[in-house]
Image (cartoon, rainbow, N blue to C red):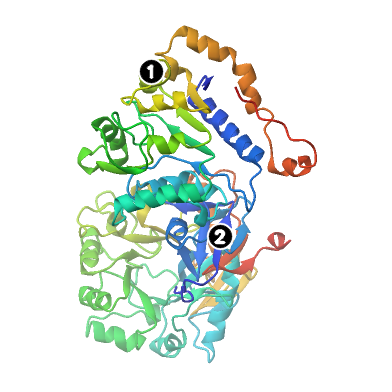
Amino acid sequence: MKLIILEHYSQASEWAAKYIRNRIIQFNPGPEKYFTLGLPTGLPRDHPESYHSFMWNNFFKHIDIHPENTHILDGNAIDLQAECDAFEEKIKAAGGIELFVGGIGPDGHIAFNEPGSSLVSRTRVKTLAMDTILANARFFDGELTKVPTMALTVGVGTVMDAREVMILITGAHKAFALYKAIEEGVNHMWTVSAFQQHPCTVFVCDEDATLELKVKTVKYFKGLMLVHNKLVDPLYSIKEKETEKSQSSKKPYSD
Amino acid sequence: MRGKQSAAGARVLQFTNCRILRGGKLLREDLWVRGGRILDPEKLFFEERRVSDERQDCGGRILAPGFIDVQINGGFGVDFSQATEDVGSGVALVARRILSHGVTSFCPTLVTSPPEVYHKVVPQIPVKSGGPHGAGVLGLHLEGPFISREKRGAHPEAHLRSFEANAFQDLLATYGPLDNVRIVTLAPELGRSHEVIRELTARGICVSLGPAGHSVADLRAAEDAVWSGATFITHLFNAMLPFHHRDPGIVGLLTSDRLPAGRCIFYGMIADGTHTNPAALRIAHRAHPQGLVLVTDAIPALGLGNGRHTLGQQEVEVDGLTAYVAGTKTLSGSIAPMDVCVRHFLQATDFVVLDDSLHVQATYISGELVWQAEAARQ
């Protein structure tokens, strides 16, 4: 894995954004070659705080993506399992996920794969853990009774199938989960730990998130920042890429 | 104003790189329009799975809702209170010219006139949708003749009336059929006004409290008028008893606690820098910001130069941005265009709009460009 440690939340966000941008441009997407970005699912549709609103306000309305190319799990589908199975098929049809970007819960979950989830699970309906419900309460004016208790989610296995996984972890309240995820063994109680067995994982975090890690670990990866920063600097641009096409393209760094 | 039919197949326009007014704030958001209606882009994206057909870059400017002027007596030489044979073309001229002031809908206002004038003019000004031809007509505003004698301002004394005798029937006899009428301004202290207000309100006509004087027009009388159905105050502070701390009068309605629950009282203000001192503007705004409505109370001299002009049955002297009844110191309407009023108001009340001078660059009605400033055309 690559562990990228930045000082603050805003710097971690910026690094991650630049990385994703470079990855997309290097991939050289085109009409026949789609860059498939995977994101974890969330709350049911029809709610003002729904994931659809979240995705629209924070992502889709700022870019020129065509609605046909967005696929969000529909929590209001009549047959939920069929909806999940269809989602898996859509991923296959798109050629698999190129890059999955997600976060980590305080209980170490990825997407809504709560502690105890199978590490080879696929997209399915999950009952949410109390911790997650509490964390989501802020979207429902703090009213616990209003928070949905079930969610459709991609499985750990689904994410493991992605060619690359990026996990964003910021804040002291995530520190213990990060420790469990990377310094302890692979364990279904901390589902993010599954990515220790993925060939290409990037963890992007701020200083606070590293509070539970060994000083040795932090020092090691901070020392690698010189090399890791080459992934975001130089920052590529689509227009320049057009002219570079004739010249040999740089090989992306990998360990 | 109703736009064209909103067919699902109609073109979707996206105004981008702009700031829009939402929830009392200016937000950096795109505005989506289809078939003359504002669209929810999120619904379009997820349900219809469509993108916009046409994008318009607004150069970082502010996209404001079109201004609505509910008190405008004429302009550019046109006097709505003149009983001519072709009132329609006068209204059309004003409707077209005010587009450049950012006004997209208005209520042509008639000042106190003899019944013959109303009977001739009122039927000639129907409600009309706006478009490239001009701003939309929402309905007429009849200010007078049922107003106070003491506070009549520029309204001619000879034509003032009361409805003591037959209440609503008197009003009907004076105005004629009320189909094209949207607002009636009257003084609450006139006898039997409550019957009249109730009758007008029942017909969907907005009743406004207007030139009101008399020792009896205290706050109580005004509150009663609101209970009967009045919802507006015509140019607050002007042509009414001044606010007194033991007898707030009509001005007291802004902070009255005896109004029907949930009812918001609206009040017009002429922010031309003359009719009200900025300090008074601020007091009203701070007391009751949600009710404030900017009006021009513009007269036919709007858009013309200094000199003598007419307003209904009166002669008016115009000098710069002020207009007086000829030979007196009585203010007689205003000649400040709506966008000037908006800028004045901004200066007086100091909103949080940064370094934008609020000069109208382009006017759109139902998503269609109907006027554009010279500079913007390049």
Residue B30 location (% of width, % of height): 53, 54
Residue at numbered disc 2: B14
Q: Residue type at mark 1: give it.
A: Gly
Q: CA distance from mark 1 to mark 2?
A: 52 Å
Residue at numbered disc 1: A185
Q: Residue type at mark 2: give it.
A: Gln
Residue under the image location 44 percent in, 80 percent down: B127
In the displayed orientation, state which residue is furthest to the right. Answer: A246
Q: Nearer the viewer, residue A174 or A184?
A: A184
In the drawing, does residue B282 fall left or right of residue B367?
left
Q: Nearer the viewer, residue B373 or A15?
A: A15
Q: Chain of mark 1?
A: A
In the drawing, does residue A130 fall left or right of residue B65?
left
In the depicted structure, whether residue B320 falls above or below residue B140:
above
> Considering the image in quadrants, where does the C terminus of chain B appear?
bottom right
Q: Nearer the viewer, residue B311 or B173?
A: B173
Tell if the residue under mark 1 belongs to the same chain as the one under mark 2: no
